[in-house]
Image (tube, rainbow, N blue to C red):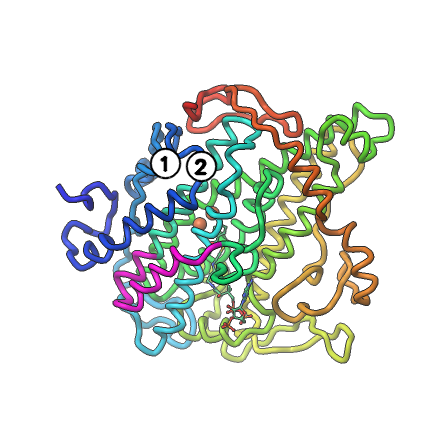
Protein backbone atom coordinates (compact mmCIF):
# COMPACT_ATOMS: atom_id res chain seq x y z
CA UNK A 1 0.00 0.00 0.00
CA UNK A 2 1.47 3.35 -0.96
CA UNK A 3 1.17 6.48 1.11
CA UNK A 4 -1.32 7.74 -1.47
CA UNK A 5 -3.86 5.14 -0.46
CA UNK A 6 -4.04 6.99 2.84
CA UNK A 7 -4.91 10.31 1.24
CA UNK A 8 -8.67 10.47 0.96
CA UNK A 9 -9.52 11.70 -2.51
CA UNK A 10 -11.98 11.46 -5.32
CA UNK A 11 -9.53 12.29 -8.10
CA UNK A 12 -8.39 8.71 -8.69
CA UNK A 13 -5.01 9.47 -7.20
CA UNK A 14 -3.96 5.81 -7.11
CA UNK A 15 -4.13 5.70 -10.93
CA UNK A 16 -2.35 9.00 -11.54
CA UNK A 17 1.39 8.27 -11.29
CA UNK A 18 2.37 11.74 -12.46
CA UNK A 19 0.37 13.45 -9.76
CA UNK A 20 1.64 10.90 -7.23
CA UNK A 21 5.24 11.74 -8.09
CA UNK A 22 4.60 15.46 -7.70
CA UNK A 23 2.80 14.96 -4.40
CA UNK A 24 5.50 12.58 -3.22
CA UNK A 25 8.01 15.39 -3.40
CA UNK A 26 5.68 17.99 -1.96
CA UNK A 27 4.18 15.99 0.94
CA UNK A 28 7.30 15.84 3.16
CA UNK A 29 7.83 19.56 2.65
CA UNK A 30 4.23 20.23 3.56
CA UNK A 31 4.64 18.18 6.74
CA UNK A 32 7.80 20.00 7.77
CA UNK A 33 6.05 23.29 7.07
CA UNK A 34 3.10 22.11 9.21
CA UNK A 35 5.40 21.05 12.05
CA UNK A 36 7.33 24.29 11.91
CA UNK A 37 4.48 26.74 11.26
CA UNK A 38 1.33 24.90 12.38
CA UNK A 39 -0.30 25.08 15.83
CA UNK A 40 2.45 25.46 18.39
CA UNK A 41 2.51 23.15 21.40
CA UNK A 42 -0.40 20.90 20.48
CA UNK A 43 0.84 18.69 17.68
CA UNK A 44 1.04 15.60 19.86
CA UNK A 45 -2.47 15.68 21.35
CA UNK A 46 -5.66 13.98 20.25
CA UNK A 47 -8.15 16.52 18.95
CA UNK A 48 -11.80 15.82 18.21
CA UNK A 49 -11.82 16.83 14.55
CA UNK A 50 -14.01 16.59 11.55
CA UNK A 51 -12.32 14.95 8.57
CA UNK A 52 -13.68 14.92 5.05
CA UNK A 53 -13.62 11.41 3.58
CA UNK A 54 -15.87 12.06 0.59
CA UNK A 55 -17.93 14.88 -0.89
CA UNK A 56 -21.29 13.27 -0.16
CA UNK A 57 -23.24 14.94 2.64
CA UNK A 58 -22.52 12.03 5.00
CA UNK A 59 -18.85 11.96 3.98
CA UNK A 60 -17.51 15.34 4.83
CA UNK A 61 -18.27 15.46 8.50
CA UNK A 62 -16.59 12.46 10.11
CA UNK A 63 -15.74 13.27 13.72
CA UNK A 64 -13.07 11.51 15.73
CA UNK A 65 -9.86 12.02 17.69
CA UNK A 66 -6.77 12.69 15.56
CA UNK A 67 -3.34 14.13 16.13
CA UNK A 68 -3.05 17.08 13.79
CA UNK A 69 0.09 15.96 11.93
CA UNK A 70 -1.80 12.72 11.19
CA UNK A 71 -4.86 14.53 9.89
CA UNK A 72 -5.94 12.99 6.61
CA UNK A 73 -5.65 15.98 4.32
CA UNK A 74 -7.59 14.95 1.28
CA UNK A 75 -8.20 16.06 -2.28
CA UNK A 76 -11.85 16.53 -3.09
CA UNK A 77 -13.67 18.00 -6.02
CA UNK A 78 -17.42 18.21 -6.26
CA UNK A 79 -18.74 15.85 -8.96
CA UNK A 80 -18.51 17.20 -12.51
CA UNK A 81 -21.57 18.20 -14.43
CA UNK A 82 -22.27 16.60 -17.77
CA UNK A 83 -21.75 19.11 -20.56
CA UNK A 84 -20.54 21.85 -18.25
CA UNK A 85 -20.28 25.20 -20.01
CA UNK A 86 -18.56 28.50 -19.38
CA UNK A 87 -21.14 30.53 -17.51
CA UNK A 88 -20.09 34.10 -18.30
CA UNK A 89 -17.71 36.31 -20.22
CA UNK A 90 -16.75 36.30 -23.89
CA UNK A 91 -16.95 32.53 -24.22
CA UNK A 92 -20.24 32.23 -22.35
CA UNK A 93 -22.04 29.02 -23.33
CA UNK A 94 -18.99 27.31 -24.81
CA UNK A 95 -17.82 24.01 -23.27
CA UNK A 96 -16.05 24.52 -19.94
CA UNK A 97 -12.27 24.24 -19.90
CA UNK A 98 -11.03 20.89 -18.70
CA UNK A 99 -7.40 21.88 -19.23
CA UNK A 100 -5.75 25.24 -18.74
CA UNK A 101 -6.49 27.38 -21.79
CA UNK A 102 -3.14 28.59 -23.15
CA UNK A 103 -4.13 32.24 -23.56
CA UNK A 104 -5.35 32.48 -19.95
CA UNK A 105 -2.64 30.41 -18.36
CA UNK A 106 -0.99 33.29 -16.52
CA UNK A 107 -4.23 34.75 -15.26
CA UNK A 108 -5.39 31.40 -13.98
CA UNK A 109 -2.09 30.64 -12.37
CA UNK A 110 -2.20 33.97 -10.54
CA UNK A 111 -5.68 33.32 -9.23
CA UNK A 112 -4.80 29.83 -8.00
CA UNK A 113 -1.51 30.92 -6.43
CA UNK A 114 -3.13 33.90 -4.70
CA UNK A 115 -5.94 31.75 -3.35
CA UNK A 116 -3.47 29.04 -2.29
CA UNK A 117 -1.19 31.50 -0.53
CA UNK A 118 -3.88 32.68 1.89
CA UNK A 119 -4.47 29.22 3.30
CA UNK A 120 -1.05 28.47 4.89
CA UNK A 121 -0.74 32.18 5.72
CA UNK A 122 -3.73 31.99 8.04
CA UNK A 123 -2.31 28.91 9.78
CA UNK A 124 0.91 30.84 10.36
CA UNK A 125 -0.95 33.84 11.73
CA UNK A 126 -2.85 31.66 14.19
CA UNK A 127 -0.09 29.34 15.28
CA UNK A 128 0.38 30.61 18.81
CA UNK A 129 -3.27 30.99 19.80
CA UNK A 130 -3.64 27.52 21.29
CA UNK A 131 -1.67 28.35 24.43
CA UNK A 132 -4.13 31.10 25.39
CA UNK A 133 -7.44 29.45 24.50
CA UNK A 134 -10.55 30.60 26.40
CA UNK A 135 -11.99 27.07 26.50
CA UNK A 136 -11.38 23.58 25.22
CA UNK A 137 -14.27 24.00 22.82
CA UNK A 138 -12.60 27.07 21.30
CA UNK A 139 -9.28 25.28 21.19
CA UNK A 140 -10.83 22.55 19.09
CA UNK A 141 -12.47 25.05 16.77
CA UNK A 142 -9.13 26.78 16.22
CA UNK A 143 -7.52 23.49 15.25
CA UNK A 144 -10.45 22.55 13.02
CA UNK A 145 -9.99 25.80 11.14
CA UNK A 146 -6.23 25.24 10.95
CA UNK A 147 -6.38 21.72 9.52
CA UNK A 148 -9.03 22.74 7.02
CA UNK A 149 -6.95 25.70 5.85
CA UNK A 150 -4.18 23.12 5.46
CA UNK A 151 -6.54 21.08 3.32
CA UNK A 152 -7.41 24.16 1.26
CA UNK A 153 -3.73 24.51 0.53
CA UNK A 154 -3.77 20.92 -0.72
CA UNK A 155 -6.76 21.77 -2.89
CA UNK A 156 -4.84 24.53 -4.67
CA UNK A 157 -1.65 22.48 -4.84
CA UNK A 158 -3.62 19.74 -6.55
CA UNK A 159 -4.71 22.21 -9.25
CA UNK A 160 -1.15 23.51 -9.65
CA UNK A 161 0.47 20.09 -9.84
CA UNK A 162 -2.15 18.48 -12.00
CA UNK A 163 -2.69 21.27 -14.52
CA UNK A 164 0.32 23.57 -14.54
CA UNK A 165 3.23 21.20 -15.08
CA UNK A 166 6.60 22.31 -13.91
CA UNK A 167 5.54 25.89 -13.16
CA UNK A 168 2.80 24.52 -10.99
CA UNK A 169 5.21 22.33 -9.05
CA UNK A 170 7.46 25.31 -8.43
CA UNK A 171 4.55 27.44 -7.28
CA UNK A 172 3.49 24.62 -4.95
CA UNK A 173 6.92 24.71 -3.33
CA UNK A 174 6.85 28.48 -3.01
CA UNK A 175 3.54 28.30 -1.21
CA UNK A 176 5.48 26.56 1.56
CA UNK A 177 8.31 29.07 1.54
CA UNK A 178 6.59 32.43 1.93
CA UNK A 179 5.82 33.35 5.53
CA UNK A 180 3.15 35.59 7.01
CA UNK A 181 4.63 38.90 8.13
CA UNK A 182 8.13 38.08 6.88
CA UNK A 183 9.80 41.12 5.32
CA UNK A 184 11.85 39.15 2.78
CA UNK A 185 9.26 36.64 1.65
CA UNK A 186 5.85 37.83 2.83
CA UNK A 187 2.52 36.29 1.95
CA UNK A 188 0.91 37.85 -1.13
CA UNK A 189 -2.08 39.75 0.25
CA UNK A 190 -1.99 42.43 2.95
CA UNK A 191 -4.40 40.99 5.51
CA UNK A 192 -2.36 37.80 5.63
CA UNK A 193 0.72 39.58 6.88
CA UNK A 194 -1.03 41.17 9.84
CA UNK A 195 -0.57 39.69 13.30
CA UNK A 196 -3.45 37.60 14.63
CA UNK A 197 -2.07 36.85 18.05
CA UNK A 198 -4.98 37.07 20.45
CA UNK A 199 -8.46 35.57 20.37
CA UNK A 200 -10.26 38.82 19.67
CA UNK A 201 -8.09 39.05 16.57
CA UNK A 202 -8.86 35.42 15.77
CA UNK A 203 -12.64 35.83 15.87
CA UNK A 204 -12.47 39.09 13.92
CA UNK A 205 -10.20 37.40 11.37
CA UNK A 206 -12.49 34.40 10.92
CA UNK A 207 -15.51 36.71 10.78
CA UNK A 208 -14.14 39.19 8.26
CA UNK A 209 -11.17 37.64 6.49
CA UNK A 210 -12.49 34.09 6.12
CA UNK A 211 -15.64 35.75 4.81
CA UNK A 212 -13.63 37.25 1.96
CA UNK A 213 -12.70 33.62 1.31
CA UNK A 214 -16.38 32.77 0.98
CA UNK A 215 -16.95 35.41 -1.70
CA UNK A 216 -13.75 34.72 -3.62
CA UNK A 217 -14.38 30.98 -3.54
CA UNK A 218 -18.00 31.45 -4.55
CA UNK A 219 -16.97 33.46 -7.59
CA UNK A 220 -14.35 30.83 -8.50
CA UNK A 221 -16.87 28.04 -7.84
CA UNK A 222 -18.55 29.08 -11.11
CA UNK A 223 -15.28 29.31 -13.02
CA UNK A 224 -15.22 28.13 -16.61
CA UNK A 225 -12.10 26.16 -15.68
CA UNK A 226 -14.09 23.27 -14.32
CA UNK A 227 -11.50 21.58 -12.08
CA UNK A 228 -11.10 24.86 -10.19
CA UNK A 229 -14.84 25.36 -9.95
CA UNK A 230 -15.37 21.88 -8.53
CA UNK A 231 -12.51 22.30 -6.04
CA UNK A 232 -13.84 25.62 -4.76
CA UNK A 233 -17.36 24.26 -4.46
CA UNK A 234 -16.17 21.73 -1.96
CA UNK A 235 -13.98 24.21 -0.08
CA UNK A 236 -17.05 26.35 0.51
CA UNK A 237 -18.65 23.64 2.62
CA UNK A 238 -15.76 23.92 5.07
CA UNK A 239 -15.63 27.70 4.96
CA UNK A 240 -19.07 27.93 6.54
CA UNK A 241 -17.67 26.61 9.82
CA UNK A 242 -14.81 29.13 9.86
CA UNK A 243 -17.22 32.03 9.56
CA UNK A 244 -19.43 30.51 12.22
CA UNK A 245 -16.45 30.42 14.58
CA UNK A 246 -15.78 34.11 13.97
CA UNK A 247 -19.32 35.41 14.02
CA UNK A 248 -20.41 33.41 17.06
CA UNK A 249 -17.08 34.03 18.83
CA UNK A 250 -17.50 37.78 18.55
CA UNK A 251 -21.13 37.51 19.54
CA UNK A 252 -20.09 35.66 22.70
CA UNK A 253 -17.54 38.35 23.55
CA UNK A 254 -20.11 41.09 22.96
CA UNK A 255 -22.60 39.25 25.13
CA UNK A 256 -20.11 38.84 27.94
CA UNK A 257 -19.06 42.47 27.76
CA UNK A 258 -22.72 43.47 27.96
CA UNK A 259 -23.21 41.26 31.02
CA UNK A 260 -20.23 42.91 32.70
CA UNK A 261 -21.42 46.40 31.72
CA UNK A 262 -24.70 45.72 33.46
CA UNK A 263 -22.82 45.06 36.68
CA UNK A 264 -21.26 48.53 36.62
CA UNK A 265 -22.63 51.94 37.49
CA UNK A 266 -21.80 53.90 34.34
CA UNK A 267 -21.01 51.09 31.93
CA UNK A 268 -17.67 52.74 31.14
CA UNK A 269 -14.60 51.16 29.59
CA UNK A 270 -12.62 51.39 32.82
CA UNK A 271 -15.34 49.65 34.72
CA UNK A 272 -15.43 46.81 32.20
CA UNK A 273 -11.66 46.58 32.45
CA UNK A 274 -11.85 46.44 36.21
CA UNK A 275 -14.02 43.34 35.76
CA UNK A 276 -11.50 41.82 33.32
CA UNK A 277 -13.74 42.16 30.30
CA UNK A 278 -13.12 43.60 26.83
CA UNK A 279 -14.69 47.08 26.47
CA UNK A 280 -16.90 47.65 23.43
CA UNK A 281 -14.54 50.40 22.25
CA UNK A 282 -11.72 47.88 21.85
CA UNK A 283 -14.02 45.41 20.10
CA UNK A 284 -15.05 48.22 17.73
CA UNK A 285 -11.43 49.04 16.93
CA UNK A 286 -10.64 45.41 16.11
CA UNK A 287 -13.71 45.32 13.85
CA UNK A 288 -12.50 48.47 12.08
CA UNK A 289 -9.07 46.91 11.59
CA UNK A 290 -10.03 43.52 10.17
CA UNK A 291 -12.99 44.78 8.18
CA UNK A 292 -10.87 47.36 6.36
CA UNK A 293 -8.00 44.95 5.69
CA UNK A 294 -10.52 42.42 4.43
CA UNK A 295 -12.13 44.98 2.11
CA UNK A 296 -8.69 45.37 0.53
CA UNK A 297 -8.74 41.68 -0.35
CA UNK A 298 -11.29 42.38 -3.09
CA UNK A 299 -8.68 44.43 -4.97
CA UNK A 300 -9.05 47.84 -6.61
CA UNK A 301 -12.48 49.39 -7.26
CA UNK A 302 -11.49 49.73 -10.91
CA UNK A 303 -9.51 46.72 -12.07
CA UNK A 304 -8.50 45.54 -15.51
CA UNK A 305 -7.49 42.23 -13.90
CA UNK A 306 -11.06 41.71 -12.76
CA UNK A 307 -12.32 42.57 -16.26
CA UNK A 308 -9.85 40.11 -17.81
CA UNK A 309 -10.76 37.33 -15.38
CA UNK A 310 -14.43 37.83 -16.22
CA UNK A 311 -13.96 38.06 -20.00
CA UNK A 312 -11.96 34.85 -19.90
CA UNK A 313 -14.76 33.10 -18.01
CA UNK A 314 -12.44 32.38 -15.08
CA UNK A 315 -13.95 34.41 -12.26
CA UNK A 316 -17.53 35.61 -12.20
CA UNK A 317 -19.77 37.50 -9.84
CA UNK A 318 -21.29 36.18 -6.64
CA UNK A 319 -24.08 33.73 -7.58
CA UNK A 320 -23.53 34.60 -11.24
CA UNK A 321 -25.97 31.99 -12.57
CA UNK A 322 -28.65 32.46 -9.99
CA UNK A 323 -28.74 36.22 -9.66
CA UNK A 324 -28.09 37.53 -13.15
CA UNK A 325 -29.53 37.18 -16.62
CA UNK A 326 -26.89 38.93 -18.67
CA UNK A 327 -23.66 36.98 -18.22
CA UNK A 328 -21.71 38.84 -20.89
CA UNK A 329 -22.17 42.44 -19.71
CA UNK A 330 -20.16 43.84 -22.60
CA UNK A 331 -21.84 47.27 -22.63
CA UNK A 332 -23.06 47.70 -19.07
CA UNK A 333 -21.58 50.40 -16.89
CA UNK A 334 -21.33 50.91 -13.16
CA UNK A 335 -21.09 54.11 -11.23
CA UNK A 336 -18.71 54.27 -8.33
CA UNK A 337 -17.12 56.75 -6.01
CA UNK A 338 -13.59 57.88 -6.80
CA UNK A 339 -11.33 60.75 -5.79
CA UNK A 340 -10.92 63.49 -8.36
CA UNK A 341 -8.99 66.69 -7.70
CA UNK A 342 -8.87 65.92 -4.03
CA UNK A 343 -12.62 65.43 -3.74
CA UNK A 344 -15.04 62.52 -3.80
CA UNK A 345 -16.72 62.22 -7.17
CA UNK A 346 -18.89 59.75 -9.05
CA UNK A 347 -17.51 58.01 -12.06
CA UNK A 348 -19.12 55.76 -14.65
CA UNK A 349 -16.93 52.80 -15.65
CA UNK A 350 -17.48 49.63 -17.70
CA UNK A 351 -19.12 47.13 -15.39
CA UNK A 352 -16.48 44.53 -16.15
CA UNK A 353 -13.86 46.83 -14.66
CA UNK A 354 -15.91 47.32 -11.50
CA UNK A 355 -16.39 43.66 -10.63
CA UNK A 356 -14.13 43.77 -7.58
CA UNK A 357 -16.37 46.49 -6.20
CA UNK A 358 -19.50 44.53 -7.08
CA UNK A 359 -18.19 41.50 -5.16
CA UNK A 360 -17.14 43.73 -2.28
CA UNK A 361 -20.71 45.07 -2.15
CA UNK A 362 -22.06 41.56 -1.59
CA UNK A 363 -19.51 41.05 1.17
CA UNK A 364 -20.44 44.30 2.88
CA UNK A 365 -24.11 43.27 3.04
CA UNK A 366 -23.12 39.98 4.64
CA UNK A 367 -20.96 41.76 7.24
CA UNK A 368 -23.83 44.12 8.05
CA UNK A 369 -25.97 41.10 8.81
CA UNK A 370 -23.32 39.90 11.28
CA UNK A 371 -23.15 43.29 12.97
CA UNK A 372 -26.93 43.29 13.35
CA UNK A 373 -26.66 39.98 15.16
CA UNK A 374 -24.09 41.32 17.62
CA UNK A 375 -26.19 44.41 18.20
CA UNK A 376 -29.15 42.19 18.92
CA UNK A 377 -27.06 40.55 21.65
CA UNK A 378 -26.44 44.02 23.12
CA UNK A 379 -30.11 44.84 22.92
CA UNK A 380 -31.09 41.60 24.61
CA UNK A 381 -28.82 42.48 27.51
CA UNK A 382 -30.42 45.92 27.73
CA UNK A 383 -27.32 47.82 26.61
CA UNK A 384 -28.00 50.83 24.38
CA UNK A 385 -24.54 51.15 22.79
CA UNK A 386 -24.14 49.68 19.29
CA UNK A 387 -21.30 48.40 17.11
CA UNK A 388 -20.99 49.69 13.54
CA UNK A 389 -19.07 49.02 10.35
CA UNK A 390 -16.89 51.90 9.20
CA UNK A 391 -17.19 53.30 5.69
CA UNK A 392 -15.59 51.15 2.98
CA UNK A 393 -13.22 54.07 2.37
CA UNK A 394 -11.77 54.02 5.87
CA UNK A 395 -8.21 52.67 6.35
CA UNK A 396 -7.74 51.21 2.90
CA UNK A 397 -4.44 50.07 1.45
CA UNK A 398 -5.62 48.99 -1.99
CA UNK A 399 -7.61 50.69 -4.69
CA UNK A 400 -9.06 54.18 -5.08
CA UNK A 401 -8.92 55.16 -1.45
CA UNK A 402 -5.45 53.99 -0.55
CA UNK A 403 -3.06 56.87 0.16
CA UNK A 404 -5.91 59.13 1.27
CA UNK A 405 -7.24 59.67 4.75
CA UNK A 406 -10.85 59.10 5.70
CA UNK A 407 -12.78 59.16 8.93
CA UNK A 408 -15.06 56.31 9.96
CA UNK A 409 -17.94 57.91 8.05
CA UNK A 410 -15.91 58.01 4.84
CA UNK A 411 -15.23 61.76 4.77
CA UNK A 412 -11.89 62.86 3.36
CA UNK A 413 -9.77 64.34 6.12
CA UNK A 414 -6.24 65.64 6.44
CA UNK A 415 -3.35 63.44 7.41
CA UNK A 416 -2.91 65.39 10.67
CA UNK A 417 -6.50 64.82 11.66
CA UNK A 418 -6.24 61.16 10.75
CA UNK A 419 -3.07 60.68 12.80
CA UNK A 420 -4.65 62.42 15.76
CA UNK A 421 -7.81 60.31 15.68
CA UNK A 422 -6.41 56.96 14.58
CA UNK A 423 -5.89 55.78 18.18
CA UNK A 424 -9.67 55.98 18.65
CA UNK A 425 -10.34 54.12 15.45
CA UNK A 426 -7.78 51.34 15.28
CA UNK A 427 -6.27 49.04 17.88
CA UNK A 428 -3.06 50.49 19.28
CA UNK A 429 -0.25 48.95 21.30
CA UNK A 430 -2.11 49.61 24.50
CA UNK A 431 -5.32 47.87 23.34
CA UNK A 432 -3.36 44.91 22.10
CA UNK A 433 -1.36 44.64 25.30
CA UNK A 434 -4.54 44.78 27.39
CA UNK A 435 -6.26 42.08 25.34
CA UNK A 436 -3.17 39.90 25.46
CA UNK A 437 -3.05 40.27 29.20
CA UNK A 438 -6.58 38.86 29.45
CA UNK A 439 -5.66 35.80 27.42
CA UNK A 440 -5.00 33.24 30.15
CA UNK A 441 -5.55 29.67 29.02
CA UNK A 442 -8.64 27.86 30.26
CA UNK A 443 -8.48 24.19 29.35
CA UNK A 444 -10.63 22.35 31.91
CA UNK A 445 -13.55 20.83 30.00
CA UNK A 446 -16.67 22.92 30.57
CA UNK A 447 -14.79 25.97 31.92
CA UNK A 448 -14.65 29.30 30.12
CA UNK A 449 -12.55 32.46 30.35
CA UNK A 450 -14.12 35.46 32.04
CA UNK A 451 -14.12 37.73 28.96
CA UNK A 452 -16.32 35.56 26.74
CA UNK A 453 -19.70 33.84 27.12
CA UNK A 454 -19.97 30.08 26.57
CA UNK A 455 -21.37 28.87 23.22
CA UNK A 456 -25.00 27.88 22.90
CA UNK A 457 -24.02 24.29 22.09
CA UNK A 458 -21.02 22.05 21.49
CA UNK A 459 -19.62 20.55 18.29
CA UNK A 460 -20.33 17.33 16.41
CA UNK A 461 -23.24 16.39 18.65
CA UNK A 462 -21.15 16.77 21.82
CA UNK A 463 -21.89 19.13 24.71
CA UNK A 464 -19.76 22.16 25.58
CA UNK A 465 -18.24 20.19 28.50
CA UNK A 466 -16.89 17.47 26.20
CA UNK A 467 -13.16 16.74 26.27
CA UNK A 468 -12.46 18.06 22.77
CA UNK A 469 -8.70 17.92 23.21
CA UNK A 470 -7.05 15.20 25.31
CA UNK A 471 -4.35 17.20 27.03
N1 LIG B 1 -2.91 42.98 -0.73
O1 LIG B 1 -6.42 44.89 -10.10
P1 LIG B 1 -6.20 44.90 -8.63
C1 LIG B 1 -9.22 33.06 1.84
C2 LIG B 1 -2.55 43.59 -5.82
S1 LIG B 1 -9.31 34.70 1.34
C3 LIG B 1 -1.81 43.02 -1.53
O2 LIG B 1 -6.70 46.02 -7.86
P2 LIG B 1 -7.18 42.28 -8.66
C4 LIG B 1 -8.88 32.80 3.24
C5 LIG B 1 -2.94 42.69 -6.97
O3 LIG B 1 -2.49 41.35 -6.73
C6 LIG B 1 -9.61 34.63 -0.42
N2 LIG B 1 -1.87 43.17 -2.87
O4 LIG B 1 -6.76 43.59 -7.97
C7 LIG B 1 -9.32 33.61 4.25
C8 LIG B 1 -2.28 43.38 -8.14
O5 LIG B 1 -0.90 43.04 -8.12
P3 LIG B 1 0.00 43.14 -9.44
C9 LIG B 1 -8.36 34.60 -1.24
C10 LIG B 1 -3.08 43.29 -3.43
O6 LIG B 1 -6.02 41.57 -9.22
C11 LIG B 1 -8.96 33.36 5.56
C12 LIG B 1 -2.41 44.85 -7.77
O7 LIG B 1 -2.60 44.89 -6.36
N3 LIG B 1 -8.69 34.40 -2.62
O8 LIG B 1 -9.41 32.20 1.06
O9 LIG B 1 -8.35 42.54 -9.53
C13 LIG B 1 -8.19 32.27 5.88
C14 LIG B 1 -3.60 45.51 -8.46
O10 LIG B 1 -4.68 44.65 -8.32
C15 LIG B 1 -4.26 43.26 -2.68
C16 LIG B 1 -8.43 35.27 -3.61
O11 LIG B 1 -7.86 36.31 -3.40
C17 LIG B 1 -4.15 43.10 -1.27
N4 LIG B 1 -5.23 43.04 -0.48
O12 LIG B 1 -7.79 41.54 -7.39
C18 LIG B 1 -7.74 31.44 4.86
C19 LIG B 1 -8.90 34.88 -4.99
N5 LIG B 1 -5.31 43.42 -3.51
O13 LIG B 1 -0.68 42.34 -10.50
C20 LIG B 1 -8.09 31.69 3.55
C21 LIG B 1 -7.86 35.03 -6.04
C22 LIG B 1 -4.80 43.55 -4.74
O14 LIG B 1 0.07 44.59 -9.76
N6 LIG B 1 -7.38 36.39 -6.18
N7 LIG B 1 -3.46 43.47 -4.69
O15 LIG B 1 1.31 42.54 -8.99
C23 LIG B 1 -7.97 37.35 -6.92
O16 LIG B 1 -9.02 37.15 -7.48
C24 LIG B 1 -7.29 38.68 -7.04
O17 LIG B 1 -5.92 38.46 -7.02
C25 LIG B 1 -7.64 39.71 -5.94
C26 LIG B 1 -7.05 41.06 -6.36
C27 LIG B 1 -9.14 39.78 -5.77
C28 LIG B 1 -7.00 39.36 -4.60
FE1 LIG C 1 -9.51 28.41 3.33
FE1 LIG D 1 -11.34 29.58 6.02
Q: Which type of secondary structure does the marked residue at label 1 adopt?
A: helix
Element on which disc 2 rests:
helix
Question: Compared to 232, does 350 lie above or below?
Answer: below
User: Residue 179 appears at what percent x and percent y?
Assistant: 47, 55
The quadrant in which the N terminus is found is top left
Question: With respect to residue 258, does 211 lie above or below?
Answer: below
**Outermost residue to the front:** 184
Q: Quadrant of residue 375?
A: top right
Image location of residue 253, percent across then percent down: 65, 33
Residue at 23% across / 58% down in the picture? 22
In the shown orientation, is residue 415 left or right of residue 98?
right
Is residue 132 shown to the viewer in this render? yes
Which residue is at a point 79% across and 61% down the rendered structure image? 418
Horizontal relation, residue 241 to residue 29: left or right: right
- For the point 30% across and 76% down, the residue is 102
Up/down of 192 relative to 135, above or below = below
Question: Quick one: 122 or 243, which is closer to the camera?
Answer: 122
Res 83 quadrant in image: bottom left
Residue 455 seen: no
> Left or right: where does residue 371 sit relative to residue 114?
right
Highlighted magenta segment, given as a residue range? 157-179
Q: Name the residue under label 1.
A: 68
Q: Is residue 448 magenta?
A: no
Of the image marks 2 and 1, the number of the one nearer the N terminus = 1
Q: Residues at badges 2 and 1 in contact (C-beta under 8 Å)?
A: yes
Estimate how packed mark 1 is, as few (under 14), some (14 to 19) or many (20 or more) residues with alpha carbons within 10 Å.
many
Task: Find the distance from the CA under tag 2 to the CA under tag 1.
Answer: 8 Å
* Frontmost residue, 49 versus 365: 49
User: Which mark, by number, is residue 170?
Assistant: none
Q: Where is residue 20 in the image (x, y as percent from the top left)?
A: 19, 54
Determine which residue is flagged by label 2: 143
Amino acid sequence: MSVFDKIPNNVDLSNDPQLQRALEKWLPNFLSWWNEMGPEGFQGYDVYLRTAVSVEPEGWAHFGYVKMPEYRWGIFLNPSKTNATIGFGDGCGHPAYQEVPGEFRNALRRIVVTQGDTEPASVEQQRRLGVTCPSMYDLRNLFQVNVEEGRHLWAMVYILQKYFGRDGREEAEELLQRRSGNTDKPRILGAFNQPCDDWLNFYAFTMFTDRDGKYQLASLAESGFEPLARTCQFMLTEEAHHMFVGESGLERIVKRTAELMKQTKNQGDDEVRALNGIPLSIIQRYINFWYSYSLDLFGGEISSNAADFFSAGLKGRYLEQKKYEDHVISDATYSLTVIENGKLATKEVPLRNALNEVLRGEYVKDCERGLARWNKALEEEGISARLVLPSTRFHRHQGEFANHNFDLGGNLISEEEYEAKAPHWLPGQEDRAYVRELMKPVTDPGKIANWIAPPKSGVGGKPFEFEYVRL
